Amino acid sequence: MVSLTVWWALIALVLWLVGQALDQPAMLAQCIASAAFLVAIGETDDWLRRRWRADPAERCGLNRGLTISAQWQEKVDG
């Protein structure tokens, strides 16, 4: 959680500094809100990527320890 807060603050500072450098200043509160949005997108992307790379059985919500075909057979047999 600390690293997330550090990233959020760093992104907000970079956005604010870039605005100052380009002579298009924004209020720090606006930069903080934009940084929060960017961090949320990044964290969602990370979560989806990790979920997608997970074991296919885990991704489908199947029990661990059985092969997918054995679990399918259990569902068919009832």
Image (cartoon, rainbow, N blue to C red):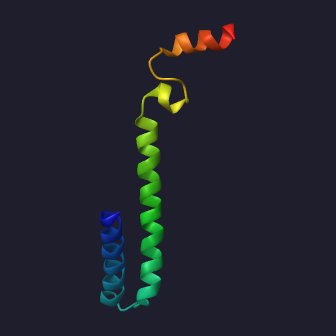
In the image: residue 70, left or right of residue 42: right
- Above or below, 62 against 8 in this view is above
In the rendered view of the protein, which quadrant contains the C terminus? top right
In-front residue for pair 3/30: 3
Rendered residue at 51%/16% (across/down):
68
Rendered residue at 30%/70% (across/down):
6
In the image: residue 17, left or right of residue 70: left
- Above or below, 56 against 21 in this view is above
In the rendered image, residue 69, in percent from the top left (x then y), is placed at 53, 11
- Above or below, 43 against 51 in this view is below
In the rendered view of the protein, which quadrant contains the N terminus? bottom left
In the image: residue 73, left or right of residue 20: right
User: Residue 19 appears in which quarter of the rendering?
Assistant: bottom left
- Above or below, 36 against 59 in this view is below
In the rendered image, residue 4, in percent from the top left (x then y), is placed at 35, 65
Rendered residue at 47%/84% (across/down):
30
In the image: residue 34, left or right of residue 62: left
Rendered residue at 55%/29% (across/down):
60
In-front residue for pair 70/47: 70
In the rendered image, residue 47, in percent from the top left (x then y), is placed at 44, 48
